[in-house]
Image: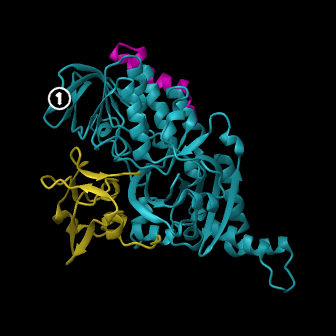
Amino acid sequence: MSDDIFDAIIIGAGPAGIACAYVLAKEGKNVLVIERGYNAGSKNVTGGRVYTYALELVDKGLYCEAALERKVVHEQIMVLDSDRALTIDYHDPSFNEDVPQSYSILRAVFDNWFAGKAEEQGAMFAYGIRVDNLIEQNGKIVGVVAGEDEIYANIVVAADGVNSLTAQKAGLRSDITAGSVGVGIKEIIELPAKVIEERFNLNPNEGAARVILGCTAGMHGGGFIYTNRDSISLGCVFMPEELAKQKTQVHELFQDFKMHPSIYHLIAGGVTTEYSAHLVPEDGWKGVSKRLYREGMLLVGDAAGFVINTGVIIRGIDLAIVSGVAAARAVLRETNSVCVGPAYMEELGRLNLIATMKATQGYSKLLDNSRLYSLYPRLANDIAGQVFGVSGSVPEPLVKGIKRIIKENVTIWQLIKDAWRGYRLI
Amino acid sequence: MTVERMVIEELLSLDKFTIDEDEAHIVLNKSICSQCQEKPCLIVCPAVLYKLKNNEISFDYAGCLECGTCRILCKNKGIVKWEYPRGTFGVTYRFG
């Protein structure tokens, strides 16, 4: 390691850290990204997808060369109950026009590509090195300790993900609590592109994103499917606090979900090639660190808590990239280290990140309703069964049948209360 | 070959691990663990690395997916050390 002082040290080569490095290096800054994995992305997991606007923010047209899987033009919601499923599919070709809205990605592939682009801009990447500690002088963070090495910089950017042990060491946040994160489990299931396109009704290069309710044994959480080029990302997120109160091991719950008849027929004939797990912030704005900086240090991405889950879309990678760009702009703007943190907050505001987090803050409360995970999925499937069922006997009048089904599952009063609460929250 | 229900050993065998033989990145204090009634680690670890043998927790850090779920659920702090593996060690995702 060199004894020079870097303009910036970035801890962690995920989308936030790489975006920050890219923008800084492009402006001629001397940037070091320290990554504990063998290469960028090797420790990272997503659902998932990236919303393209964020890559456009880093550099116009950058997405054209990116290691992306499929353009998402089908947005789907699936509601499971026992062996039944109700699926809503919203197909919007405009999501594929001009700059396509979002792409499914695989993080080991995407992050590695993105790091390569930042390297082309002049950023330096040190792989296989874990940052063990921060160096503090007169109340200011001035560098990092990695093994035997001490490395100094004008600013340290913590982009080390949801557990962000460095943000904790800096005293910027306390350890995450069991109620504020979900544990996501995922299998990558390889299938020929043609099979994926047939099963999900896709044109070549186009993809589907699906959220799934009613697959978490009644616990707060949900499943997801993203179609990649030659594979499907099938995953499920559980709230660990609720998991701990029941007896089935989390991987078993995930296998139950995978073998549900409505899920299985989408992946049948495929081969699982990877099994992964990762935490994901679930508290929205409430989960964002109350302090995003101190002198000499900024928090970006998951380390800051920038994730939005509305129940139908999950955003993290785009917010990570935006926060990385905001951090870079603050560093470029301010030479006085005391001013960089406040400038970062201003840039987060200018890029609408704070306002976006605040505008969606009701969703995490909305999703904190146990009826969403078992009772309402059953109700939705019961109603669908009533609407589509034909037995040859005299059909019950539709409205009467639906009212009966609602009453069997929930009181009308409860339903109205939940609807009103949902309306108020979002 | 088709996708099927898998046990945890099969799932973990799909992943690439580089084991740090010299340093455990997660360390338990088993006397604290023996006092813990709930033992949430047995249920919540996606890699099922926490097991109960003769009423005592046994733990193997090889196969850790580095998610952090055990740390945040461990209320009695029987996990006395939770760090990421040293550089280059641990899981390497090929897809992620």
* x and y percentages locating residue A19 in the rendered image: 43, 31
> Alpha-carbon neighbours of circle 1 within 10 Å: few (<14), some, or many (≥20)?
some
Label 1 sits on a secondary structure element that is: strand
**In this rendering, position of residue A409 left or right of residue B90:** right
| Residue A335 on the magenta segment | yes
Task: Tell me the yellow chain.
Answer: B
Seen at 70% across and 63% down, the residue is: A415
User: Is A281 in front, or is A69?
Assistant: A69
* x and y percentages locating residue A318 in the rendered image: 51, 38
As displayed, is residue A310 above or below residue A319? below
User: Is A200 in front, or is A23?
Assistant: A200
Residue A342 visible in the shown view: no
Q: Quadrant of the rendered structure where residue A76 is? A: bottom right
Hey, what amino acid is under mark 1?
Glu
| Residue A318 on the magenta segment | no
Give the residue at mark 1. A150
Chain assignment, label 1:
A
Magenta stretch, main secondary structure, is helix
Residue A215 visible in the shown view: yes
Magenta stretch: give its range.
A331-356
